[in-house]
Structures are given as structure tokens and as C-alpha cells.
Image (cartoon, rainbow, N blue to C red):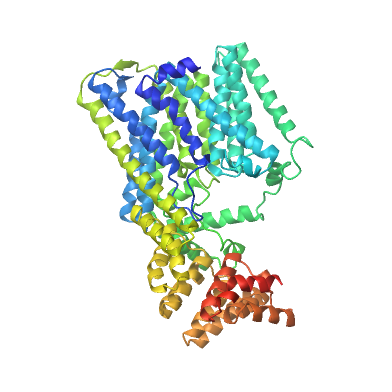
Amino acid sequence: MLQSIKRALRNPLGVFGTLWPLVLLVPFLPGLPRPGLGGFPWRQELALACLLSVTLALALRRTLKQQLLVPSSLTSRPDFLVLTIASFAICTASSLFWAANPYSAAHHGFQWGAYLLFFLLMRLVAAQPRLLRSTIYSFAVVVWMLSVSCLVEAFVGASLGGSFRLHARPPLRGFSGFGEVMAVAGPMFAAFALDSKRPRRALLCGATAIVVWLATVQSLERAPILGATAGLLLVSVGACIKRGSRSHVLKRTGLLAATLVLSTAALFAPGLLSSDNQNVTLRRFQSTSISEDNTRVRLLFWSAGLEMFRAHPLLGVGANNYEVAFPSGRASFSAAHPNSPLVKMNEEYLAQYAHNEYLQILAELGIVGSLLFLTFCLVLAANAWRAWNSSQRPLLALGAGAGLVAFAISSVASSFSFRWLGGGMAFFFAAALVSNLAQSTKTKPEVVRASASPRLAFATGLVFALTMFVGAGAQATNSVMHAEAQSSPSPNQADHFYLIALKANPFDASTHYDYGLFLYRLKRPHEALPHLRYAVSRGLNTSANYAFLAAVEEEAGDLAGAERTLTEAVAAYPRSVFLLVRYAATLERAGKTEASASAFSNALLVDARTARGWYQLIQFDIDAAIVASRQDTEIATPRELLPQQAFFVVLEENERRLNVSPTTGWRGQMKSLNN
């Protein structure tokens, strides 16, 4: 294995094929600080952009010397699969011209551009058996590291204690991107075990498939588990029904299937895991129903996405703009279905994704983008079928196709899918294998001659990769400075770090939001206002976020602005008792007593006891609310008021509005609550 990797590293394509799996480890490594409210992820993007830049620069250099071995298809016209990926990437990037948040659309466009480059390079790698073997070895090492870490996390405990935090970023369990990578890898290594002619190599691939499956089960994510199950079943059935399958393939299939079943049963055996973690996965599946909160929230997200599509059917709201358009989509759904129990849900959490990649594409890119994506899927499926039927290595094609199926099934209820770079890379690795096997009988590697086509291709890719590297570097600077600002002991130093962060990336909504709160707490509401407005209008739109913005607008003297903000908030969250009472308070301060009474009446209709509790807390202070709740059981106590983040928003606002002294500020008020 080491010799194969060493030989591969002498080739620019071998460098890429061997090192790309290491990008999957990057998000879990310690080191640089992370802000509490993170913006776009940059670690994987920066690592992949760096690897792409180095690879393409070396490849361009070797094409100039006529020394690079590539498939002959590179010098001909691109095939239809490449065209569909490129078309969808262009559509995604073009949506920045109509998206409410162009930066988010451009970011997603760069992701798909990176996927296209990754796919093209992986096809070149897959065309050369030695390079492909090195890639598989490297991928196996990485998935072993991730799988063992996840299993140790499951056996030792969800947080793994302080010492382990020095070595990895816990928890792996419950992190969506991790589960999808495992779901793709499991069926692929199962097929590698069946395809390999060498028993020792088959044994290693089979062991990898088993440990990856166990890690997938312990990832606690139902969608990747279902996807991986379907993928492994597809490999098992396909290997058995394929004509010409040798007896050793059938024996290996039976042995692998039996081992998977027995290891899964052993994993859930009583006493194997600690009591806190035992059978968590089973309990999650057992609790799955239409009445489960997790399921109902997904239904809410899907319903809001459909409303976005109805409002913008042709082009959508713009790539990666789901969270920006979520309030309007939710408001439309609430207006159409006022009595739905979904209307009352999820006011305290950000709705970054639709938890269904296909529906999110429909909402963000409309009919045009959805048709392009569907075309890409159909062409890829046709390539997989052709590879299965005509390739000299059908089992390899079966494994790659099963990995694609696992990813596709997981994406039905996934919060990440292509949105997390690692999962997308695993998908396009499998897609590159399928594409190469589908064409393996038609093209053979050849030395590229000095011509404009390959040089232009590598040069264009290099420009894109360098641009992506600069963009990811800017986001990295923004994120690190944002985190440093949050941990700075000095307000002046924190202010300085926030300004650096915004200079590095002036489009990051989370930095604007945290900087706005920082300025607000320094009693600089006029300076805080544009930052908070920017953040709330670009995706940070929970009920508490709206309330913070309204509080700053009121303190800055813009009572009309606060009223507009809360009008929008109440439209999005019409059954939020907190927002209705907060809206009533603002209307009362504006002298609109009738409208205020109407808003408060609506709050009483939703939950009278909670509405009275919020009224006491918002209009007076926490001491008055505690006294009132003790005197009247029809008034909720401050402890009962939800969402909790909104509770702290009100405490902080009261501290300033009622001129509470620093010694009896909201932290002091919390002490009185605890007493």
C-alpha cells in the first residue's frame, strides 16, 4: 500500500487522488478558534482549494512538457455528464443576480464549481489503475480514522471528556456531513471486497465496509442509515444476480452480509455500550412518527420551501437563500393554514436548510434549476447502468452506483447533502468511478500532446481554484477574527477584531449580528442598527433575532422601524406568544392602543397563561413577574417562558429600558429568578 502511494505522489494526478480524502478530516481537527455563531464553513473549502491549485499548477506544467498521462476524451468535446454538471453550476452561480443574498448564491456556485473540478480530476485519476488504487487506500485510511473515532465516541461517551477534545472535534455523532460520507463509503468498500482478486485486499476492504457501517449506525442520523442500508442491500443483491458471478463472489457476499448482521446485533447487545448511549439509534427509529417534533419540523421546512417555489416558480429565490426567504415562506404557509400545528413550531432555531436537498433546489432555483439537476441525475444514472452492464469490472461499478443511491436516499431528509463539501466530494468520487467505468471500453490513457485544449482546461481550472482559495481565505480570516473578538477581554480589542473580520468578509451575516449586539451592549444603538438589520434580512431570523432588532430600533428612536420589524416577525411566527406580546408592547409605546389590545388578545387566544407571563416580564421586570406569578396561578412564571433565548433578550432590554443599575442588571435578575 505504501509503495502504491509513493508512486502515485510522483504524478500531479496522483497527488490529488492520494490527498483529497484528507480534506474530509479537516472539520474535525482542533486549532483555530470558532465563533459561537458561525458563518459559512471554510476549513474544507480552503483545504480543497489549496489541493486543487497545487494539482492544476503541476498538471499545467507537465502538459507544457507533454508528460501528463490522461484519457483521450480530454482532448475531445466534453461528454454530456460534464455538460450537465457545468450547466447546473452556472445556473447556481447566476442566481446571485436575483437572490436577496447574492453572497450566499455565489458561495454555493463556487461549491458546485469545485465539485466540477473535483469530478474532472477524479475521472483522470480513475482512468489509471495505479492512481485509483492509491486513492482507494488513502480513502480507506481516512474512513477508518473517522469510523474508529465515532465508535470510540459511542463507547466512551458522547462528549469523550476533556483529553479527547485535544485530538478531535466531538461529537462526530449527529453531525450530518459525517453520516453521509460514511453512507457512501460503506457500499463502495463492500463492493471493493467482492471485486478484489487478492484475498488479503478483499479482507481489508470487507473490514473497512463493516467498520464504516457500524460508524454510520452510531452516527445517530436516520437518513444516512437508511441510505447506507439501501446501498449495502443493492450491492448484495446485485452481486448475487449478476450473470457470470464466480463462486467466490457469492461466498464473499454471504460472509459479508452475515458479518454485517452479526456485528450490528452485537453493537446493540445489552451491556456493550454505556447506559447513556445504549441503543440510541434504535430509540430514534422507534420514536419516528408523524407526531414526532423532529418529523413535524421537517414538514414545516418542506411546506415553507413549497411556498417559496409557488412565489418564484421559474428561477426560485436564489441558491443558498432558503434561510433568507424562510420568513416569507413560513408566513405564506401560516396564512394558508392558520390552524396547522406546524405553525407554532421552531421559532427558536435558525432554518438554514430545508432538510430535503431536492425540495431546496426547487425552492432556490425553481423549475429551471430543478430540470438541470434532474438531467444531471438521469445522465449519471444512465452512466451507472452502462457501467454495470458493459464494464469489465461490474462489481466496482455496482459499489460506486450503490454509494450514489445511498447519498440520494439520505438527501431526502438531510440537512447538508451537497451543502457540506465533504459529502459532495464522496458523492463525486463515486460518480467519477461510474463515469470512468461507463467509458472504459471506449477510451484509453494517452500522453497529451502540446495543444491548446488541455492547457486551456488546466489554466481555467487553476484560475478558478486560486479564486476559491482567496475567497475561502477571506472567510477564514473573518471567522478567526470573529472568534477572537468574542473572546477578547477588552471592548476596544474586540471592536478592532470585529472590524478586521468585516473587512475580510463584509458579507458575513453572523459577524454583522454579533457585532451589532456588541455595539448595542456598549450603548451605541445607532451604530448597531445597520449591522442587525443586515443580519436579520439575510437569514438570522428567529423570533429572538427579530426581538433584538426591534429593541435596538426602539432605543435608537426608530419606533416605526421596530413596529415594521415586529409586523414581519408576527407574520412569520403568528402563533408565537412571545412575539405577539412583544408586538403589543411596541404598539402601546407608539400610542396605538387598539392595535396593541388586538395583538395581546391574539396572544391570549394562543396561550393565555403564557401571554400573561410574558406581559409581566416585558412591561415591568423579572421581580414583578415573579411576584405576579406567585399571586396568580393563571400567570406563567419566568422559568416557564419559552423560547429561552427570547427570555434573555427581554431581560437585557429591561435592564436598559428601566435603567437597571449594573449590579442589578440581567445577570443580577437571573440570580433573583434562581432564588
Tell me where residue 395 appears, x and y as whole percent. Answer: 53, 20
Viewer-nearest residue: 190 or 135: 135
Q: Quarter of the image holding residue 605? A: bottom right
Q: Quarter of the image holding residue 262? A: top right
Viewer-nearest residue: 44 or 659: 659
Looking at the image, can residue 192 be seen?
A: yes
Residue for point 68% across, 46% down: 284
* Total residue callouts: 0
Tell me where residue 385 appears, x and y as whole percent. Answer: 47, 26
State whether residue 350 is above or below residue 6.
below
* 555 relative to 345 in the view: left or right: left
Tell me where residue 55 appears, x and y as whole percent. Answer: 34, 28
Tell me where residue 457 appears, x and y as whole percent. Answer: 27, 30
Viewer-nearest residue: 91 or 425: 425
Q: Residue furthest right?
A: 270
* 3 relative to 257 in the view: left or right: left
Q: Quadrant of the C terminus?
A: bottom right
Residue for point 65% across, 32% down: 214
Residue for point 48% across, 55% down: 305
State whether residue 469 is above or below residue 641.
above
Q: Quarter of the image holding residue 46? A: top left
State whether residue 560 is above or below residue 413.
below
Looking at the image, can residue 229 be seen?
A: no
Viewer-nearest residue: 563 or 55: 55
